[in-house]
Image (cartoon, rainbow, N blue to C red):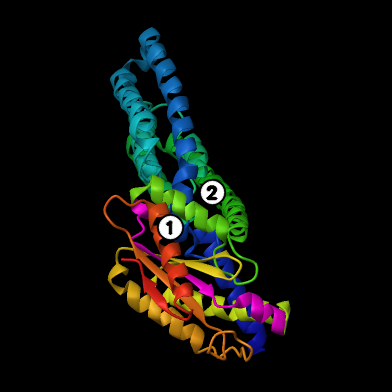
Amino acid sequence: MNKKRSVYISKIKKWSRIFFFGSDDINFFARQRQSAAEINYVPLLTTTVIALISFFFLHVLSEWYVVYESIHHLNFVLMSVTILLFIFEMVYLRKHRKYSTVVYYLYIIVCYIYVILLGAVFMPTDVSPWVGILMCVFPTLLFTYPFFHYIVNTIVSVIYITLCFIVKDQTMAIRETIITILALFCSDFATLIVAYQRVLSLKANTRYEQDSRTDDLTGLPNRRAINLRLNNAHNKPKEFIAGMIMLDVDNFKAYNDNYGHIKGDEALIKIGNVLKIIASRYNIFIGRYGGEEFIVFVNFINVNNIDNIAKEIKESVKDLNIDFVSNPSKEKQLTISIGVARTETGDDALDVLNNADIALYQSKNKGRNVITDKN
């Protein structure tokens, strides 16, 4: 009975997280904030263009018909705001898409204020569909936590229904209430479905990207991920690399020849596990450069500890005690050689990589199982 109850509770928790967050992993959006902002930019741009066309036609109609005269100035103000927003999107937001979601919400609030005034104040004797239309169209385009939409939709609905009962007659207010409540439920349901589908799609893409950048054997970032990191360091200042450590397993060919490739793969897996722990401890990037060679990108926060990191890597591999009785070196276990380089003034990422590589081969020439600091 307790087992069934725990299963039901687990399912309720899971679907509650999906309902409020669009995913059973509530930290997913936090990790994918940049992706969400990228996705939200195109709907924001599309919405702005559609809104601009709509406001233009309303502005033209307000010039022709007396019934629209009362909203002429209000419409002109919102059309002007939309034009400025479109220019802002094309000039600034196109290069800084991380602000797309915030800008979209601000614009939605402005539009909601417009349609609330339009429906409740300027059309007191008519049923206005605009609040319902906005609730069913705008929020479903956004890629954010669904509960944000629920909150915004509910607040807008309460404000609009309250104004309708204050400004309009009771029969008209009841009609508006029914329409608004139906629109609220439709909007929330559509928001849940759209967010859930987008989460599944983004998770699938994220998983594919991770798989394509992960070494199958060790689970560390592979050569493709390393190259991307190097390119980012060259093109983006935020990806600045303060130093590099290159390490190579000593006499690994001889180890494979003596123990076989299966044992060799097992040794690399053990080394990879140790490197993952160190990468997590210092919050640094460690990848498999190729074969038995690995690379460490040290950030500016840990650059003063770069020698300690190199020593910890060397000692951690030694502590694995991987037997290598026929080791050509004096050690009877598997060891590594390490090269360390720091970024100097005028160096780019490839310069630091080259210096670390030179330091590594100096370690090899010194007899292996040593650390050489190029600087």
| Residue 51 against residue 110 in the figure, above or below | above
Q: Residues within 10 Å of mark 2 (few under 14, many from 20)?
A: many
Q: Earlier in the sequence, mark 2 or mark 1?
A: 2
Q: Is residue 241 magenta?
A: yes
Determine which of the numbered discs, if any, sits on residue 191 in the image.
2
Q: Point out residue 26 in the picture as x, y percentages from the top left corner.
A: 49, 65
Of residue 362 and residue 131, the one placed in the foreground of this image is 362
- C-alpha distance separating marks 2 and 1: 51 Å
Q: Secondary structure at mark 2?
A: helix
Question: Which residue shows up at 28% across the image and 19% down it?
Answer: 73
Locate residue 327: give its quadrant. Answer: bottom right
Which dot, 2 or 1, sits closer to the camera? 1
Front residue of 225 and 198: 225
User: Which residue has dot 1 on it?
Assistant: 354
- The amino acid marked with disc number 1 is Asn
- Which amino acid is tagged 2? Thr
Q: Which mark is residue 305?
A: none
Span shown in magenta: 238-258
Where on the picture, by quarter, is residue 19? bottom right
Quadrant position of the N terminus in the picture: bottom right
